[in-house]
Structures are given as C-alpha cells and as structure tokens.
Image (cartoon, helix red, strand yellow):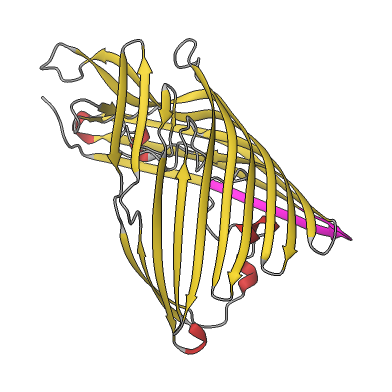
Amino acid sequence: MQVLGSEYKFDDRVLAAYATFSQQIKKFNYQLGLRVESSKYTGALISKSQQFGNEYPLSLFPSVFATYKLTNKQDIQLNYSRKINRPNFFQIIPFIDYTDSLNITRGNPGLVPEFTNSMELSYQNQLKTGHSLLASIYYKNTENLIARYQYRDKNPDASKSDSIIIGTYANASQSYTYGLELTGKDKIASWWDVTSNINFFYATLKAGNIAGGLSSEQFSWFAKVNNNFKLPANYSIQLTGDYQAKTLVPQSNGGGGGRGGGPAFGGGANLASAQGYANPIYGVDIAVKKTFLKANAASLTLQVSDIFRTRYNSTHSSSPYFIQDYSRIRDAQVVRLNFNWRFGKMDVSLFKRKNRKADTDNIDTQGAGGQ
C-alpha cells in the first residue's frame, strides 16, 4: 500500500565558535578567520518506529582574505576559505515519496556534509567615475558533494513485485571547479545603474564511490544582469535577469542546506547530478520599492519572481538501466510584499564585510566563483 504521508520527529543541533583578526600594513591589509563547528541530528519516523541520525565531529574552517593596493583605483585580492554544507531534512529522512509514480524517491540518512575549499585571485579597477571592473580566477574542490542518484531496485510497495527506478541522494567523492569570473558596475545615468556578472567554469565530478566508473566533466557558464532605476517620488525599480547554461555542477551552491533539495527529487536546479546534467535555465525578476517617512526610514517593496514564467528546472539522467528527462516548475512566480522600518541609531559598520569584494556583491551574483 502506498503511503502518501508520515509523522516524524527531527532534531538538528549545530555548535560553533569563530574568531577573526585583521591588520593593515601600508598598502597591504589582511583578515584571518577561524570557525570551529560540530553538529548532530536525530530523527524518527513515528509511523514505522524507525530511528535515524548522525553526528559530525569537530571541524575547523579557516579563511584568509588579503588585499594589496596597487594605486588609489586598483588592487589585487587573494582569498581562501573552507566551508561546510550540510544535507537538508528532505535529503536525509528515509521516507518513501510516491507522489510521482514514475519518480519514487527516498532520503538517505547516511548522507554526510560536503566540505569545500575555495581559492580566488582577483583584480579590481575603478575605471572612472561610476564604472568599475572585478576580474577573478578561482578554484574550488568539494569533498562528499551531495548529488542526485538513481538506481534500479525492488518496488518498496509490498503489493507490487516489479522493480523500479528509485531516486535518492548520495555523496560523490570529489568535485573540482575552476573558472574565470567578470563583474562590472556601470552608472549609465544619474537614475540608472547596471551590475553585470559572467562566469565561465569547467567542472569535474567523480562519483566512482557510488557506482564504478561514474565520472563526468563539462564546461559551462552563468550570466546575470541587475538594473536599478531611480524614479521620482522616492520610487525605484530593480530588474534582474539570469541564465545558467547546461551544467553538471551548478555554480549557485552545493547540494545541501535546502538549496536544490526538497521532496521533489528531479527538479533541483542547484543540485549536482551524478548521472547526467541540468539543462539551461533562465528567468527575469522585478521589484518595485517606495521609501517614505523622515530620512526614508520606511520602505514598501513589491517583488515578483520569474515574471515570464521561464524557470523550468529540467534535468537529464542516464545509466545502463534508464534514460530520463525531467522538467517541472519550482516555486513558480512568487509574489512578495515587504515592509521595512528603520528606527533608532544604526551602526552600519556592523554589516560591513571585511572582504572588499562586497562592493560587487550587492546583487546575488549566483555564479560567483568565490562564494
């Protein structure tokens, strides 16, 4: 009998501490950071009296950000960081989802976090008033990359005796990505500025630990353009478009932490595939903002995502047992209305990133190599 729902309990705990140190010596400044973290999760499927969980030992996450100022308008940056990306709830819970009879899925309680070491060398130039360029070359190595994986097995439905394809999540042993990223900021007019980002990268995914000989590599690219328009009466409009070419390891993020996971297995656009690739995806978002009250302390923002309804998460997977093409819309055309009110004295330095690359990160440059 197919079970379409279940009762569960889940507890996820993360213990962490961090410290930073920064110093400037003439034209050279640097920041050193160290984060210490351990985590543990436990869960239970009440309907099946099934327990699951995992405990991750204490891990260290160092970071180094260094900048050398060539001139008043040019500098070179060298960055290194180690980060963790934990699997999300839906990727872990061992619940069998029969919602789509052609794509039965279940979580993998044996998933472990993925760890990414990133290195980036950047050159920044304030070309002239209102124009700047940031060029970066980068390299990323991820261990235990969380990826989609499908295999043939006996039908979990006891009332059926056939074998089917089951989708789940697995840790691929390694992935490597290196590339070139260009980000430009241009003030076209007093009322219009544009931030453009393009990222060319080559990715290799090794998943021989999941199935013998499972490995793939591919060149891909990502682009994003953000337009900001200032209008009369304290109105402003932000129009953003992005395009991700066909890729096996999307550059927006890793596989865990809720990005690309969820109960619908096939359509995670931000999740790597151990047996195929994600097809191109593109879309346009818009936001209209009105500020008011004294010193523009309050604002009302209307946001609409995917205004042309083009963001179809589409994937291709293949193995000796199957060839599958899957497409769906995820979170189609979300509309948000946000109200923000600032009061009291605010210390903006609390929100200032030490890394000077923040100057080019005021939009979500999804393809950022150093993220």
Residue occupying the far right of the picture: 26
Q: Is residue 50 above or below residue 291?
A: above
For the point 57% across and 51% down, which residue is it? Answer: 197
Q: Nearer the viewer, residue 61 or 71?
A: 71
Residue 355 visible here: no
State left or right for residue 137 relative to residue 366.
Answer: right
Q: Nearer the viewer, residue 8 or 274?
A: 274
Q: Nearer the viewer, residue 325 or 64?
A: 325
What is the tally of numbered marks visible in this picture?
Answer: 0
The dominant secondary structure in magenta is strand
x%, y% of residue 295? 52, 86
x%, y% of residue 343? 49, 82
Does residue 204 belong to the magenta stretch? no
x%, y% of residue 244? 47, 41
Residue 254 visible here: yes
Residue occupying the far bottom of the picture: 294
Quarter occupied by the N terminus: top left
For the point 44% across and 62% down, which residue is it? Answer: 239
Does residue 29 belong to the magenta stretch? yes
Q: Is residue 255 above or below residue 212?
A: below
x%, y% of residue 355? 69, 56
State left or right for residue 244 relative to residue 138.
Answer: left
Q: Which residues are magenta?
A: 15-30
For the point 35% across and 45% down, which residue is it? Answer: 311
State left or right for residue 190 relative to residue 26.
Answer: left
Q: Is residue 166 above or below residue 329?
A: above
